[in-house]
Amino acid sequence: MDKKPYYISTAIAYTSAKPHIGNTYEIVLADAIARYKRMTGYDVYFQTGTDEHGQKIQEKAEAAGITPQQHVDKVAGEVKTIWDLMNTTYDKFIRTTDPMHEKKVQKIFKKLHDQGDIYKGAYKGKYCKPCESFWTESQLKDGCCPDCGRPCVDAEEEAYFFKMSKYADRLMKHIEEHPEFIQPESRKNEMVNNFLKPGLQDLCVSRTSFSWGIPVDFDPGHVVYVWLDALTNYITFCGYDPDGNHDEHYKKFWPADVHLIGKDIIRFHTIYWPIFLMALGEPLPKQVFGHPWLLVGDGKMSKSLGNVIYADDLVRLFGVDAVRYYVLHEMPFANDGVLSYELICERINSDLANVLGNLVNRTIAMTKKYFGGIVPAPTAPEALDDELKAVALGLPAAVEKKMATLHVADAIDEVFALLRRSNKYIDETMPWALAKDESKKERLGTVMYNLLEAIRFAAVELKPYLPDTADKIFAQLGIENKGVESLASFDGMQAGQPVGEASILFERIDIPKKLAEIEEENKAKQAEAAKPAVEFLPDIPFDDFCKVDMTVCKVLACENVKKSSKLLKFQLDDGSGTPRQILSGIAKYYKPEELVGKTVVAVTNLPPRKMMGQESNGMLLSAEKDEKLNLLMLDDNIPAGAKLC
């Protein structure tokens, strides 16, 4: 029987900087959904990646003295490293600088232009660089971007525009007929009331004020504006062909079942993107889910505010599954969640170490103690067992109901409800008391079996959210029976089989001690960051500087100094007619033969000094940073004997 296809995507991470834990939440959320769908029998295609064009990226690269491609290569690598660190099981990691994508975007742009949906004009108005968004004066909030709150700048340039109003009524009709299309409901109301009902303005879809983008191939000087480029990734990498020759992968998986995105970019995904698809004649995604933000204190994470927390730091402090649990469980369906180190520690202690870890550890330990590590047979059931069994047997349906509407935190709560019920069952049955009465041996065996089986149910359903932890529980249970199909009946543990070794899943945290350690570490980081990038020597009088004679020289000859691993000996033309000999400690960085003929700068009014028995008459100028030394070289057209001034 063929599996039903399921396509889930995240928004592609903008490669302006390393993603923080708020950005990382989205990929973990998508991974939990994808894992759950696979577990319950779907053929899942899970796509993520990076958005790599735009003015902000070009400016960041220029400020760093590197090319935009070098900049995005670095950040895309950081993004992928963090996605992998968080144990996410994406099927495809895309990059919008992929030549295949760029060619398809050019074709899409031309197709929309040729059919009259895109026209040439001029833009004049307000522009938000961080969001790469254009706004009218009436859309601004206190003169600032309504999305991010930052100041906007005046912008005026020739551009191509997309006729949004042409498809507005059709989009409104689709939203009305498909109430599940935009979720949560509050996001839908925001889009309809704030954008669709007031009337859509035509959208700028090309830029001419910068060059880092996909060129409009039929109009040099224009590059495709980032949103038309970025949004189309959902189909270009899935197998869409602008000429209509879609591959089988696209035919199987499109339309996407859900685009998972942050609430700050809901407008682009629920207005611009569906309208682009309508113009292309393609089906719309079944759902766009705008998840809330993960806040630090009461504010959004921002480098400018200095409150950014990164996933790799949290993993180093608490472990992958603890971080996954926190971000998945503490994010309400429609409201923002709050993150702090103290809250993470409290959740680890209360939920992971106590409710989950302690239950598993003592159950395995009691099985070892009372039955030699062998799963006992449940031969003495009592009415007291019925509620525990009912909660366990009802778990798959309860989780399915929550996951069907992407209430992931609530789905996890269903699993922990079974774990809490299991802990209560221990208090009710008191295995330690049963163990003292030999006549209660069969009843004790039944209690232990029920606990082991309830833990197995919980582990199976925990797998999408805490995959490593689930595997550790399976190992302690000593089972291979891990599939969700095995949860139809309460008999998956095999009597007579040995359990594995007990081990602690989550260590309890000494919260004051941990918080003090984190504070000290953060202070050290802040002190390091506060250090100047370049340290300067104290000021000297200008007249002293004028005493330094810096002369342009041509390298006539260069060789290693015998018995020295550091020194090179130069014969230089300094314009005087007599070669000048200078020794320089740069042998580690240069081969002598590659320096012959180069134009360099020497300080020529230093007194001679002996080095390795040879005289050096001056010093060559070089630059040093990060333990790398570079000899200062000038344009070869500058004549020997010229003075630096």
Image (spheres, grey):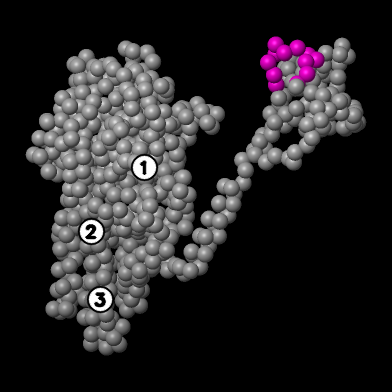
Q: Is residue 586 left or right of residue 351?
A: right
Q: Earlier in the sequence, mark 2 or mark 1?
A: 1
Residue 481 is situated, as x and y percent measured from the top left of the image, at 25, 58
Would you call the spot at circle 3 few (<14 residues within 10 Å), some (14-19), or many (20 or more)?
Answer: few
Residue kind at label 3, given as amino acid type: Lys
State which mark lies toward you, 2 or 1. 1
Residue that mark 1 sits on: 149
State which mark lies toward you, 2 or 3. 2
Marking on residue 410: 2
Would you call the spot at circle 2 few (<14 residues within 10 Å), some (14-19), or many (20 or more)?
Answer: many
- Is 621 part of what is drawn in magenta? no
Marking on residue 390: none
Residue kind at label 2, given as amino acid type: Asp
Q: Residue at x 30, y 24 (%)?
A: 205
Residue that mark 3 sits on: 424
- The answer to whether marks 2 and 1 mark residues whose Cβ atoms lie closer than 8 Å is no
Q: Residue 558 lies in what quarter of the image?
A: top right
